[in-house]
Image (cartoon, rainbow, N blue to C red):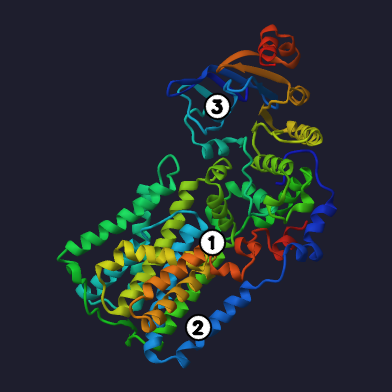
C-alpha cells in the first residue's frame, strides 16, 4: 500500500527522476575514497607477516585483536550513542571464561571457545543492558557510562579477590587454541586467523550499519527522543546493539586470552575500557575504519615510542592524543573521509529502486 | 465518538500548576486549534497528549482506548504523531533518510536488519518529499535547509508515520508570511485521513485552517467552540486585549 495519505500524488516523473542514473550519480556525491582505503589497508595487513620480523608479527596480532575490541566500542558509542565505559567487562569476562574452559575442562578447540567467548560477552552485555538501558524512561548518558564503568571496576576487584580466578595473578599458562589436531601458537598462523575474523566481523558490522537498522541507529544517536515519537522502541534498539557489541568484545577477549596464554584482572578493569575509548576517539568514532586505524596507530606509536623514548613516551603519546582531539575532533579518519561518506546514506540501492518500479 | 478526548487533565510541576483540569475533544478529521497567551499551558497539554509528560491527574482517551500512561512509542504505534516545537530533524542525514526513518518505524527489526522494506518505501518517501516541495533537495543533508523548510520536513516526518491524529506545536514559528501561507496549503489535504491539534500564536493562520478552537488561560479551558463562536466570545477577547 502506498497511502502516504493525501490525495496529492507526485507526477510520475518525480519518482522516475529519482531513479534515473543521472540523478543517482548526482546524489551519490563525490568520489568514494572509503572502499579504496579499506582495500589498501587489507592488502597491507595481508602482506605484513611476510615482511615483518616474527616478534613484530606477534605484536601485530595483539593489535588486530584490540582492533576487534575497538570495533565493539565503536558500535555502541559511535553508532548508537551509548557511552559504555565498561567495554572491558565483556572482553575480560570472555577471556576469563575461556581460560576456565581450558583449565578446568581442557577445552581448547576454536569451534568451542570462540562461540563460548562471544556468548559470554553477549549474555553479560544483555544482562547489564537490562539494568542500565531498559527502564521505562531512556537513561541518561552519565548514568549509562558510570554504570558500565562501575561494572568493570567491580569485576576487576572481584577477580583480584577470587582464589578460584587466581587473584592478582590471574590464570596463567592457558593451553594453546586448537583447530582439529593443529595447535595454534603465536606467529603468522594466529595472525591470519585473527585477520580473517576481524575482516568477517567488520563486514558483518558494515552490512548491519548500512541497513535500515543502521538508519534507526543513526536516529538513535542523533535524537533519541525524536525517534521514540515515531514509534521506535529505543530501549530495545539500544539493548540489541549493546549485546551485539558485547559479543564482539567477547570474541576479541577470548582471542586475546589464547594469544597471550594467560588472563589477569587488568583485562576486566577500567584501564582497559578507557584504552579502547582512546583508540576510537583517536581514529574517529562513527566509522568502522576509524576504530581500526585508531587502534593500529595508537598501539604502533606506543610500540615505537616506548622503544625510542623509554622514559617520556607516555607523555608524548598523551600530547599527541590531545592534539588530535583538539584539532580533529572527528578523529584522524576525517583527514581522509568527507562528512557525507562518514555519516553515510541509507536510501535504497539502485537495484532496489529498479525493483520498486511498477 | 470523538477520536481524542482529554478530561480533567492537570499537570503540576512542584509548586507550579501548569494545567488545571483542562479538557479537549477532537473529532475524526477535525482541525482543532489550541490558543492562549504565553504560559497558559498549551505546550504542556500537547505534551500530555503525546506522552512526553504524564499528567498528574486526568485521563486521555484515543480511539476508545485509555492512553494516559502509554509511552510515546506506544502512542505512536496507536496512531498519534507529534511535531516538536523546536525543530528536531536529524541534521546530518539526508532529507530522504529523515523521511525513511519515520516511515520504517513500524517495520520489524529483522526487516530493518536486512533492509527488506527499503525498496517498497521508496515511492512513499519521494511522494512525501514532493508533497512538501522538498523533492529536489532529497539527497542534501537536512542541516542545509532553511528554517521554514526544516519545519516542513518535520511535518512530513510526522505525517510519514501515517497517524490518525497529528499534534503540531507551533508549526509556523519563525516562518515568513509566504512560508506560512504555503504551510496552510500543505496542511489542507491531510484532512482526508487525519485529525489535527495545532498550537499556534498566529491567530490568522489558525482561523484559516481550523474547524474548532480551544482557548487556554492559566492552565484552564476558557472557551471551546467553532471559530466563529470563539471570535464572538467576550472573555476570549478580554484576555487577548489584556495581552495587547
Marks 1 and 2: CB-CB under 8 Å?
no
- For residue B44, the mark is 3
Vertical placement of residue B209 versus B119, above or below: above
**Can you identify the residue that label 1 sits on?**
A329
> Secondary structure beneath disc 1?
loop
Residue A137 position in % (x across, y down)? 44, 40
Say which residue appears at 22% left-offset and 60% top-offset: A157
**Residue B213: where, in percent of width, then height?**
68, 19
Question: Which element is circle 2 on?
Answer: helix
Chain letter behind tag 1: A
Neighbour class for label 2 at 10 Å: few (<14), some, many (≥20)? some
| Quadrant assignment, res A358 | bottom right
Q: Where is residue B174 in the image (x, y as percent from the top left)?
A: 71, 35
Label 3 packing within 10 angstroms: few (<14), some (14-19), many (20+): many
Q: Name the residue under label 2.
A: A45
From what the image shows, is residue A53 above or below residue A224?
below
Secondary structure category for the residue under label 3: helix
Mark 1 Cα shell of 10 Å, populated few (<14), some (14-19), many (≥20): some
| Distance between the alpha carbons at the discs numbered 3 and 1 | 38 Å
Amino acid at each position: 500500500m502506498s497511502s502516504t495519505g493525501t490525495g496529492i500524488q507526485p507526477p510520475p516523473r518525480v519518482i522516475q527522476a529519482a531513479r534515473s542514473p543521472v540523478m543517482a550519480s548526482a546524489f551519490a556525491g563525490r568520489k568514494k575514497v572509503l572502499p579504496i582505503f579499506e582495500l589498501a589497508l587489507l592488502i597491507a595487513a595481508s602482506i605484513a607477516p611476510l615482511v615483518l620480523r616474527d616478534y613484530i608479527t606477534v605484536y601485530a596480532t595483539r593489535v588486530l585483536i584490540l582492533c576487534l575490541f575497538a570495533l565493539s566500542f565503536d558500535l555502541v558509542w559511535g553508532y548508537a550513542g551509548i557511552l559504555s565505559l565498561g567495554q572491558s567487562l565483556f572482553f575480560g569476562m570472555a577471556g576469563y571464561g575461556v581460560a576456565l574452559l581450558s583449565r578446568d575442562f581442557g577445552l581448547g578447540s576454536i569451534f568451542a571457545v570462540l562461540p563460548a567467548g562471544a556468548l559470554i560477552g553477549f549474555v553479560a552485555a544483555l544482562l547489564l543492558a537490562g539494568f542500565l538501558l531498559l527502564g521505562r524512561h531512556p537513561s541518561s548518558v552519565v548514568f549509562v557510562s558510570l554504570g558500565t564503568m562501575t561494572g568493570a571496576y567491580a569485576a576487576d576487584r572481584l577477580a583480584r579477590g577470587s582464589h578460584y580466578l587466581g587473584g592478582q595473578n590471574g590464570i596463567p599458562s592457558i593451553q594453546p587454541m586448537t583447530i582439529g589436531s593443529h595447535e595454534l601458537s603465536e606467529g603468522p598462523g594466529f595472525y591470519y586467523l585473527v585477520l580473517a575474523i576481524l575482516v568477517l566481523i567488520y563486514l558483518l558490522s558494515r552490512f548491519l550499519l548500512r541497513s535500515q537498522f543502521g538508519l534507526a541507529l543513526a536516529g538513535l544517536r542523533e535524537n533519541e527522543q525524536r525517534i521514540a515519537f515515531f514509534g521506535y522502541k529505543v530501549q530495545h534498539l539500544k539493548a540489541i546493539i549493546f549485546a551485539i557489541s558485547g559479543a564482539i568484545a567477547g570474541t576479541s577477549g577470548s582471542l586475546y586470552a589464547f594469544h597471550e596464554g594467560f588472563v589477569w584482572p587488568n583485562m576486566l578493569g577500567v584501564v582497559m575500557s578507557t584504552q579502547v575509548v582512546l583508540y576510537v576517539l583517536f581514529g574517529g568514532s562513527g566509522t568502522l575504519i576509524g576504530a581500526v586505524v585508531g587502534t593500529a596507530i595508537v598501539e604502533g606509536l606506543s610500540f615505537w615510542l616506548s622503544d625510542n623514548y623509554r622514559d617520556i613516551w607516555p607523555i608524548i603519546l598523551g600530547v599527541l592524543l590531545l592534539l588530535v582531539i583538539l584539532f580533529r575532533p572527528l578523529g584522524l579518519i576525517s583527514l581522509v573521509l568527507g562528512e557525507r561518506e562518514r555519516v553515510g546514506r541509507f536510501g535504497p540501492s539502485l537495484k532496489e529502486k529498479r525493483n520498486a518500479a511498477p | 465518538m470523538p477520536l481524542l478526548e482529554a478530561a480533567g487533565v492537570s499537570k503540576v510541576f512542584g509548586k507550579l500548576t501548569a494545567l488545571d483540569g483542562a479538557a479537549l475533544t477532537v473529532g475524526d478529521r477535525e482541525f482543532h486549534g489550541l490558543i492562549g497567551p504565553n504560559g497558559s499551558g498549551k505546550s504542556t497539554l500537547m505534551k500530555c497528549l503525546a506522552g512526553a509528560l504524564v499528567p498528574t491527574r486526568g485521563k486521555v482517551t484515543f480511539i476508545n482506548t485509555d492512553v494516559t500512561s502509554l509511552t510515546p512509542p506506544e502512542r505512536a504505534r496507536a496512531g498519534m504523531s507529534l511535531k516538536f516545537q523546536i525543530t528536531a530533524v536529524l541534521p546530518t542525514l539526508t532529507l530522504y533518510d529523515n523521511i525513511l526513518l519515520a516511515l520504517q518505524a513500524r517495520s520489524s527489526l529483522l526487516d530493518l536488519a536486512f533492509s527488506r522494506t527499503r525498496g517498497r518505501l521508496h515511492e512513499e518517501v519521494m511522494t512525501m518529499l514532493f508533497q512538501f516541495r522538498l523533492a529536489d533537495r532529497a539527497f542534501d543533508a537536512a542541516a542545509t535547509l532553511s528554517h521554514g523548510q526544516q519545519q516542513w520536513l518535520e511535518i512530513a516526518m510526522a505525517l510519514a508515520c501515517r497517524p490518525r491524529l497529528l499534534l503540531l506545536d507551533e508549526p509556523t514559528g519563525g516562518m515568513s508570511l509566504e512560508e506560512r501561507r504555503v504551510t496552510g496549503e500543505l496542511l489542507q489535504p491531510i484532512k482526508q485521513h487525519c485529525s489535527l491539534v495545532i498550537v499556534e500564536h498566529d491567530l490568522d493562520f489558525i482561523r484559516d485552517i481550523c474547524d474548532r478552537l480551544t482557548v487556554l488561560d492559566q492552565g484552564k479551558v476558557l472557551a471551546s467552540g467553532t471559530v466563529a463562536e470563539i471570535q464572538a466570545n467576550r472573555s476570549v477577547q478580554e484576555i487577548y486585549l489584556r495581552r495587547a
